[in-house]
Amino acid sequence: MFLRPNYRTKDGKDHTYWSLVETVRTADGPRQRTLCYLGELNGSAQARWLKSVEVFNEQGEAEQLKLFPSHIEVPDDDPQVARVLVHRVRLERTRQFGSCFLGLELWKRLGLDGFFEQAIDDDPAEVPWSRVAAVLAINRLCAPGSELAIEERWYPATALDDLLEIEEGKINDTRLYRCLDRILPHKTKLEQHLKQRYGELFGAEFDVLLYDLTSTYVEGAAEKNPMMGRGYSRDHRPDCEQMVIALIVNREGFPFSYETFDGNRADVSTMESILRTVERKYGKARRIWVMDRGIVSEENLAAIRKRGGQYLVGTPRRQMKRFEAELLRDDWTQVRPDVEVKQIAIPQGEETYILCRTAGRKEKEKAIRNRFSARMESALAALEKSIASGRLKDRYKMERRLGRIQARHPQVNDLFEVTLRETPAGVRLLWEMKKDKEAWRDLREGAYMLRTNLQADSAEQMWSMYMQLTEAEASFRALKSELSIRPLFHQKEPRVKAHVLVAFLGYALWVTLKHLLQRRAAIVPQPWPAVVRAPPFSPMKALALLSRLQSADIVLPTTDGREIRLRRITEPTAEQKSLLHQLGLNLPERFQLNRQCSVDPAVA
């Protein structure tokens, strides 16, 4: 790392501008990358060209210094002159800046700084609790980790102390835990605040609600948390106790509300609680609920109708048998190259059924069926060989082995007719494929059915609305992958719930960034300037790109034994400039708040 002079003649005067650069390896060989620009260090010429910089002494008092390279002759009696030892300039205290800066800007755009200032800053504290809450949420967005990891590794490596004006050493795991306890009671007001902000920023509407559930597991026994239990694990960790999270989003993926349930709670039993909770938070309204078949029951649909609501839901596959004749008819409407739909009205009924069929799904389900069928036939053949060779003679043991085979292949067990038959030569195992069952399986593969009490204008419209459930699934993917809501390390129920709330805040920042990127990309005029010509960004790509922006202290040793410290941000690349322009963000030129960026006496 070294200083590089850049020479320029302007208005008949010679000027030297300095930049701090480092040598990096590239595919084309070594190249110099500019970290930041220092601007012009004065020459010995006319005083009107003198350039000064504001610094602070140890008492925090501001003064102006005129900077000269050490080889330039200047008057020694001017106290405002500082001669810099260019060959000893160095960079210190590098910090991650870009991603944290973006997270804080999203925090402010959602009005969360003001919300938490009013909610939890009533009591005086060394660090305002609203800023600690910002640290928790921004960490969940940028580099999810435990409270201990925040204290020991992540926070000291970021510029959040400058951005949030927090004194050094004031963020620790104890303060983070106490903040969790303070923010949890404000969950309902927080959800209402975010719903209002989504409407103000993006015109988001919440007339159609997408409802889905997931689970997340805990590390350890969690003996002090009665919520934890063993149930159906979406994380494929049946060995761990878990909790269930119910999430409601609108059709664009903006979160409307969420609730936590015991780990052994069945999906279908959560609907009544969710309906009551939504009414308590937002009042009664004629909402449209979109859900998959795992949450559907006659009782749940009746509860929605009782409240004047409407629904569009998936149905269990067993109900498709009623419409076998409709599956055979050739009157489908093609809505996509590989998707067909058909509307079925029930005579004297208030509901409409929508049959859907997808070519890709059919191929997938057929491949799964063939794989399981081959496995079961292989297992039956091995059992038949054991019986025929005489190694297995006890009929009771034969039946037990057959029962285990059938239990291991429930997906295709009903397709096979299997018998143990007595013959003169002994017991024989016989099996064959049920032709009628196989034909029905082949007919229904790739097909599914929707059910609604909406006045359906067309089957395509209902299918398109149901497909919006992918937004709820995308929300869970973001929570579990990018935001790392799992696993849970907290042992007490309130802390676990607060952890989920922080993940919810992280998702609020994530989905806001997602829609800002989409909206900005849509309104950029064509052709746009070269600086903003870039492909669309995903939230994670945007965070990764800006994470390479850093802040650092440029230390300028002087000939009189002092050191001038200037805290600056590294020069953004063209791609980073494009993203910042797309988001409407401007980097601060310098940090004015930290009085330690000063003229300090050199330490021997």
Image: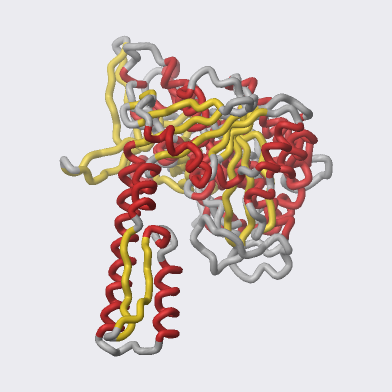
Apparent side of residue 39 relative to residue 313 in the rendered image (left or right): left
Query: Is residue 570 among the parts visible in the rendering?
Result: no
Apparent side of residue 487 relative to residue 67 in the rendered image (left or right): right
Pick the front one: 222 or 509: 222
Q: x%, y% of residue 392?
A: 34, 87
Q: x%, y% of residue 361?
A: 36, 41
Name the residue: 44% across, 44% down: 557
Q: x%, y% of residue 472?
A: 54, 38
Name the residue: 76% across, 35% down: 189
Q: x%, y% of residue 522?
A: 42, 18
Q: Residue placed farthest to the right in the image?
A: 123
Q: Residue placed farthest to the top in the image?
A: 11
Name the residue: 38% across, 58% down: 415
Q: Check the picture and name the quadrant holding the N terminus.
A: top left
Apparent side of residue 192 relative to residue 573 in the rendered image (left or right): right
Name the residue: 62% across, 64% down: 230
Pick the front one: 61 or 25: 25
Q: Is residue 600 above or below residue 338?
A: below
Query: Is residue 547 among the parts visible in the rendering?
Result: yes
Q: Residue placed farthest to the left in the image?
A: 28
